[in-house]
Image (cartoon, grey):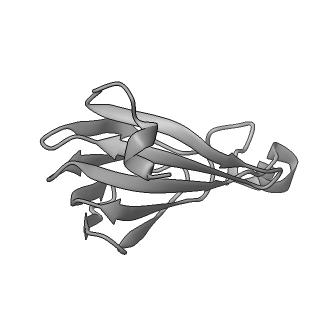
Amino acid sequence: MNIRDLHTNPKSVSLVKLFKSDETTANAVQILRGETLQKHFSNVPALLLCVEGEAIFEDENGVSASLKPGDYVDIVPMVKHWVKGVETSQLILIKLIINRRQIGHLFPENPGEK
């Protein structure tokens, strides 16, 4: 098996589930050259690992990281981020699954609370 073979439709950005357990999910992400995974945020900690190609990860806090094979970046929860494909890129996105009880203090009922 090869990660490239998981993406059967020629979409600009493709995500395919690789693995899921009670605590973790891993997804294969393909971003075509010149395309962008649009701004979004994760509500849980995540890690993005480049397997092939080159991509640029950026976030609203000013983080900018060039990702080449073997490079990875930690994705901070609740921070908008996006990824640009410098070259057609194969990436692995690993997300920690946490239930809301474990992280409730990060999501106060009143927006002004911390």
Displayed quadrant of residue 67:
bottom left
Can you say whether 61 is above or below 37 in the image?
below
- Residue at the location (50% across, 53% down)? 93
Image coordinates of residue 65 in percent, x first then y, are 26, 67
Q: Position of residue 47 (x, y in %)?
A: 51, 62
- The residue that appears at 27% across and 61% down in the rendered structure is 62
**100 left or right of 68 in image:** right
Quarter occupied by residue 12: top left
Q: Nearer the viewer, residue 89 or 40?
A: 89
Residue plotted at (79% across, 51% down): 21
Q: How many marks?
A: 0
Residue 74 lies, with reference to residue 103, above or below; the image says below
Give the residue displayed 70% in from the left and 37% down from the top. Answer: 110
Please name whichever residue, 9 or 24, is drawn nearer the observer in this view of the structure: 9
**In this rendering, would 6 be left or right of 68?**
right
User: On the rendered structure, is 100 left or right of 90?
Assistant: right
Q: Position of residue 69 (x, y in %)?
A: 31, 70
Residue 80 in view, yes or no: no
Q: Relative to residue 34, is residue 38 drawn left or right?
A: right
Camera-nearest residue between 98 and 12 = 12
Q: Look at the image and tell me in which quarter the C terminus lies.
A: bottom right
Q: Residue furthest bottom?
A: 70
Looking at the image, the residue that sits furthest to the right is: 101
- The answer to whether residue 22 is visible is yes
Residue 52 in percent (x, y) is at 30, 61
